[in-house]
Amino acid sequence: MWTIAIVLVGMLTGPQVFVVPEAGTFKDKAACQAGIAASVPAKLEPGAKKEWQDGYRQYVCVRVHGVPAH
């Protein structure tokens, strides 16, 4: 199972990672990447969209730890 995470790194705050629960989970990495392609940047608020366009915000697919592969 895979999910989408947002990754940001601040000079003073360091790394921050947030799971996007609204995105749900995906059976494989390709489906997860398709979920990102379908949602980013279309569903982003203006500030988040600007961060994404400028490279400060990344959306990545991460495997859910503890769930066996099929």
Image: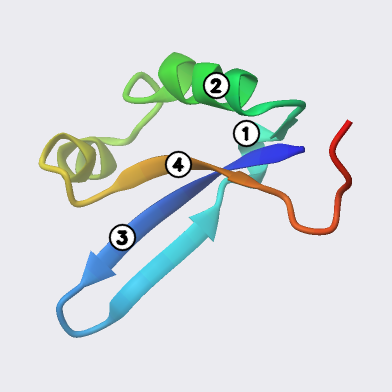
Residue at point 73%, 50% (across, down) = 64
Q: Using a 10 Å C-alpha cutoff, classify the residue at mark 4 as few (fewer than 14 neighbours), some (14 to 19) or many (20 or more).
A: some
Q: Mark 1 points at which residue?
A: 23
Q: Can you give x and y, in whole percent of width and height, for residue 6 in the image?
A: 43, 50
**Mark 3 or mark 4: whose residue is earlier in sequence:** 3
Alpha-carbon span between mark 2 and mark 4: 10 Å
Image depth: mark 2 or mark 4 in front: 4
Alpha-carbon span between mark 3 and mark 4: 11 Å
**Mark 1 or mark 2: whose residue is earlier in sequence:** 1
Q: In the rendered image of this protein, does residue 32 appear above or below residue 62? A: above
In this image, 59 relative to 55: left or right?
right
Front residue of 66/17: it is 66
- Please count the marks in the image: 4
Q: In the rendered image of this protein, does residue 7 appear above or below residue 62? A: below
Asked which secondary structure carries label 1, the reply is: helix
Q: In the rendered image of this protein, does residue 46 appear above or below residue 17? A: above
**Mark 3 or mark 2: whose residue is earlier in sequence:** 3
Q: Amino acid under label 2?
A: Gly
Residue at point 28%, 79% (across, down) = 14
